[in-house]
């Protein structure tokens, strides 16, 4: 699936598909394919080097972008999923469990899960967790603290579910509780923003020692559409809102909201799963190595100071 600003790339990829469908390609056909691939890669590189914030939002929301289960499958050799918050139910908008990374580091992995088709999205509520999802996440983090395992939290959500049932069960309290307890959790926490990082739905599992962010992910207090509806009462002004919100990785790095940008393949993570999994795995291993040896007191103190300092003008 090509995005609306990738028209030139889509035309080249259509030609490539037609040539690949040739049963017995000759040398000239293969040469033409190689030339088209070169043209496509050059256009993607130029296009993605100059993305606007609104175009970045579109990439972050791409339906083929890797989801949490893709990262679990590609980064771990073992994953034992844990279910339920022990209070109400098992929200599939957030999943998690014990995992072993490929470097043999044992961790607790958790995060938002979106679906890749309509049925999957219904099951996990499009990655919008209810209170029981956030309470499940906190239960898993407390288990990680008990067994002295680092927590790796993946963020990819439009926001917490805003429905009446979620409010009745204490959505705001669940998110606030997570933020408070994560601030003082006595084990390392690495947060990785992989797609959308939307509002309280993101920060509810987003308090960490190191905040990593994929190059074409976004992270914001409100969606561009929501911001436009409030400021201009016109959702069509979402591109203007995206420009003003400073939601892209470079802007957030400059503002010290995130710590490191993880580069994506040309054209975005959805175009090359093996490449992005390798890069995320290497970055995660390096980050955990730097955190595991830090004393608990220093870890918690640094984390608290890090978030307390955000938003200072000078």
Image (cartoon, rainbow, N blue to C red):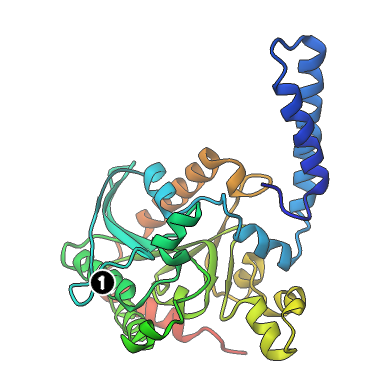
Find residue 61 and report its image quarter. bottom right
Q: Looking at this view, is 208 or 239 the one in front? A: 239
Q: Where is residue 113 in the image (x, y as percent from the top left)?
A: 42, 60
Neighbour class for label 1 at 10 Å: few (<14), some, many (≥20)? some
Q: Where is residue 238 in the image (x, y as percent from the top left)?
A: 72, 76
Hey, which residue is sitting farthest front in the picture?
119
Q: Position of residue 221 (x, y in %)?
A: 56, 81
Residue at 40%, 75% in the rendered image: 207
Q: Which residue, given by chain and number where applicable, does mark 1 sit on?
A: 296
* Left or right of 38 on screen, residue 300: left
* Image mark count: 1
Residue at 43%, 47% in the rendered image: 70
Which quarter of the image is occupied by the C terminus?
A: bottom right
The reply to whether residue 216 is visible in this rendering is: no
The answer to whether 64 is drawn above or below residue 195 in the figure is above
The reply to whether residue 9 is visible in this rendering is: yes
């Amino acid at each position: 699936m090509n995005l609306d600003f990738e028209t030139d790339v889509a035309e080249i990829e259509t030609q490539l598909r037609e040539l690949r469908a040739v049963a017995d390609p000759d040398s000239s056909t293969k040469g033409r394919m190689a030339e088209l691939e070169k043209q496509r890669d050059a256009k993607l590189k130029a296009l993605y080097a100059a993305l606007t914030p609104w175009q970045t939002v579109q990439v972050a929301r791409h339906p083929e972008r890797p989801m949490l289960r893709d990262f679990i499958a590609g980064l771990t050799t073992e994953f034992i999923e844990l279910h339920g918050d022990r209070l109400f139910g098992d929200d599939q908008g957030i999943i998690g469990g014990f995992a072993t990374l490929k470097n043999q580091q044992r961790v607790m992995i958790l995060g938002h899960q979106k679906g890749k088709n309509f049925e999957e999205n219904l099951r996990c509520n499009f990655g919008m967790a209810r209170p029981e999802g956030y309470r499940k996440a906190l239960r898993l983090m407390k288990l990680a603290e008990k067994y002295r395992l680092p927590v790796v939290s993946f963020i990819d959500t439009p926001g917490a579910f805003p429905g009446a049932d979620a409010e009745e069960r204490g959505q705001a309290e669940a998110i606030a509780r997570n933020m408070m307890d994560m601030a003082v959790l006595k084990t390392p926490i690495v947060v990785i923003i992989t797609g959308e990082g939307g509002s309280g739905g993101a920060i509810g599992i987003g308090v960490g020692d190191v905040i990593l962010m994929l190059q074409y992910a976004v992270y914001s207090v409100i969606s561009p559409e929501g911001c436009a509806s409030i400021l201009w009462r016109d959702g069509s002004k979402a591109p203007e809102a995206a420009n003003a919100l400073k939601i892209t990785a470079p802007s957030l790095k400059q503002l010290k909201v995130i710590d490191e940008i993880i580069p994506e393949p040309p054209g975005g993570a959805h175009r090359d799963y093996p490449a992005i999994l390798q890069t995320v795995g290497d970055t995660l291993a390096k980050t955990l190595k730097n955190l595991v040896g830090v004393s608990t007191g220093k870890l918690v103190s640094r984390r608290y100071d890090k978030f307390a300092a955000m938003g200072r003008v000078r």
